[in-house]
């Protein structure tokens, strides 16, 4: 199932890029400010990414056994700081709900404000629609890909290690941690790589930054606004990753991989839709 979903996603991405290159504007095309969307294909990609994320998110890890044995960069002193949970959710989880913040988190706020701002500046609702579809596509593809990788790779989280048990014995035996080991059917204790929060953050912030930069530079790569926006996206993604490591649920390499995955998708999706 995972291979089939990835195959269809690859075919649709390729088809979308080819169509954007070869097909003249038509009723199937949404024209943005420097970027175009072939809406049946791109909305299909949003659906496939979201469906893959939902289906694989509930699957058990492929190999839910063993302990984490961190080495090198991952072998630093283990962390456990629950206070980092809420800010990492607010920064990196587009569907996070908290009684104090509701659904008002930065990823969804970024998608909404970038789309609305693009439409208002250009005075064209179609620009807002294109921006929204491309950011949703980046988010969905990143979520689907990271969810598949988590289940297949089945990397134990840092709190499964002997070093964590020695450093935080009461936390290791607490219900909060032990529930990850099997009381939850999907065995979240073995879905460490890559970091889904960091991947989502990278996909959303970098896609928004790329669109903002393209709009400010007449649909071309480059210019001060383009690079400034990319810098802000990098800062937000890195902050999300640091918080996930600080919380104690990811190794440093988990968040690095998640950030690279999400960032590549976030930059790549808008650039594949540049108007030729």
Image: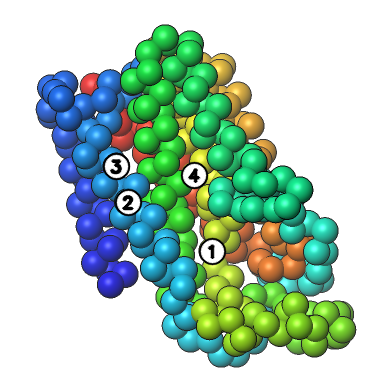
Residue plotted at (31% across, 35% down): 272
Instruction: Give the left or right position of residue 65, taking residue 48 as reference.
Output: right
Q: Earlier in the sequence, mark 4 or mark 1?
A: 1
Q: CA distance from mark 3 to mark 1?
A: 25 Å
Between residues 39 and 273, which one lies in front from this camera angle? 39
Dot 1 lies on which element?
A: loop
Q: Which is more N-terminal, label 2 or label 1?
A: 2
Q: Quadrant of the N terminus?
A: bottom left
Residue drawn at x 28%, y 21% as measured from the top left: 31
Residue wearing tag 2: 47
Q: Which residue is label 3 attached to? A: 43
Badge 3 marks a residue whose secondary structure is: helix
Depth order, front residue of 214/135: 135
Q: Quadrant of residue 26?
A: top left
Q: CA distance from mark 2 to mark 4?
A: 16 Å
Mark found first going from the N terminus, 2 or 4: 2
Q: Which mark is residue 194?
A: 1
Q: Is label 2 in contact with label 4 (beta carbons under 8 Å)?
A: no
CA gap between label 3 and label 4 equals 16 Å
Question: Is residue 3 shown above or below 36?
Answer: below
Q: Which mark is residue 173?
A: none
Which residue, given by chain and number where applicable, does mark 4 sit on? 203
Q: Is residue 268 visible?
A: no
Left or right: residue 186 compared with residue 247: left
Q: Quadrant of the C terminus?
A: top left
> Which one is closest to the eye, mark 3 or mark 1?
3
């Amino acid at each position: 199932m995972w291979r089939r979903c990835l195959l269809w996603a690859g075919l649709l991405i390729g088809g979308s890029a080819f169509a954007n290159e070869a097909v003249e504007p038509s009723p199937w095309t949404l024209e943005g400010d420097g970027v175009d969307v072939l809406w049946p294909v791109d909305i299909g990609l949003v659906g496939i990414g979201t469906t893959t994320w939902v289906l694989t998110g509930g699957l058990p890890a492929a190999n839910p056994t063993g302990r984490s044995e961190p080495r090198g960069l991952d072998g630093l002193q283990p962390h456990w700081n629950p206070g980092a949970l809420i800010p990492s959710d607010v920064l990196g989880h587009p569907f996070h709900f908290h009684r104090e913040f509701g659904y008002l988190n930065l990823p969804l706020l970024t998608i909404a404000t970038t789309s609305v701002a693009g439409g208002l500046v250009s005075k064209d609702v179609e620009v807002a629609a294109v921006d929204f579809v491309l950011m949703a596509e980046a988010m969905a593809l990143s979520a689907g890909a990271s969810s598949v990788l988590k289940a297949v790779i089945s990397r134990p989280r840092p709190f499964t290690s002997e070093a964590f048990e020695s450093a935080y014995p009461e936390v290791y035996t607490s219900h909060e941690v032990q529930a990850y080991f099997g009381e939850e059917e999907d065995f979240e204790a073995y879905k460490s790589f890559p970091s889904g929060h960091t991947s989502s953050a990278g996909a959303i912030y970098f896609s928004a930054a790329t669109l903002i930069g393209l709009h400010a530079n007449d649909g071309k790569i480059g210019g001060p606004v383009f690079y400034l926006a990319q810098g802000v996206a990098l800062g937000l993604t890195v902050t999300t990753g640091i918080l996930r490591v600080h919380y104690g649920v990811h190794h440093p390499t988990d968040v690095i991989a998640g950030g690279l995955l999400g960032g590549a998708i976030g930059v790549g999706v808008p650039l594949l839709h540049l108007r030729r």
